[in-house]
Amino acid sequence: MRHNRKRNRRGFTLIEVLLVAGILAVLAAFAVPNLMGQARNAQIKIAKAAVGRNGPIAKGLKSYKFDMGNFPDTDETLEVLFQKKNEVDDERYSGPYMDGTFEELLDAWGKPYNYRSPGEVNEDGYDLWSAGPDGINDEGQSGSDDVKNWIER
């Protein structure tokens, strides 16, 4: 008789498996939203660091201005920061001012940064912003989720 009990008790019952699956589902329901919020916050921090005064784009723009005397015009775009010296017809140019390629210069959501020089907000410099989490370019307007290189007043 004891031999039969051991043989019948080899695996988990359906109720035990469903109970464990239910517990895991409840835990996941609480954990996933918290993790998603952290991922969004991390992306925003990455974008803020990139467009900030000490970010890699700002450093490239400052180096360009040091050599050329001004920031690239809006028409030139940020692409000029990646050009090699022999690709530019100006003796003052000593680029490239950024590593990689222009096509790789994307925000945390995989979209290109927006650049305007002279700036409308930073009139003596440039405006640089990311379209933010929603991916809609609100031209850096107040109330949007765009990540900007200026402080709202």
Image (tube, helix red, strand yellow):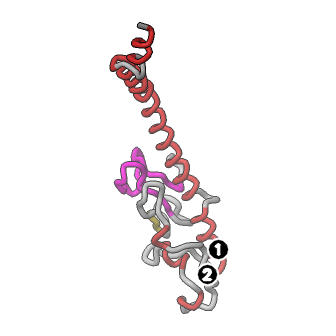
Asked if the magenta segment contains residue 128, the reply would be yes
For label 2, the residue is 95
- The amino acid type of the residue labelled 1 equals Ser
Q: CA distance from mark 2 to mark 1?
A: 9 Å
Measured from the top left, where is residue 130 in percent x and y?
A: 45, 57
- Identified at 36% across, 49% down, the residue is 134
Check the image and report above or below for 109 versus 60: above
Neighbours of disc 1 within 10 Å: few (<14), some (14-19), many (20+): many
Q: Nearer the viewer, residue 13 or 86?
A: 13
Q: Which residues are magenta?
A: 127-150
Q: Is residue 60 left or right of residue 39?
A: right
Measured from the top left, where is residue 152 in percent x and y?
A: 50, 47
Check the image and report above or below for 108 versus 1: below
Q: Secondary structure at mark 2?
A: loop
- Identified at 34% across, 17% down, the residue is 15
Q: Is residue 144 left or right of residue 47?
A: left
- Our reading of the magenta stretch's main secondary structure is loop
Measured from the top left, where is residue 145 in percent x and y?
A: 42, 47
**Circles 2 and 1: CB atoms closer than 8 Å:** yes
Check the image and report above or below for 69 versus 25: below
Asked if the magenta segment contains residue 70, the reply would be no
For label 1, the residue is 63
- Identified at 36% across, 18% down, the residue is 13
Q: Nearer the viewer, residue 56 or 137?
A: 56
N-terminal of the pair, mark 2 or mark 1, is 1
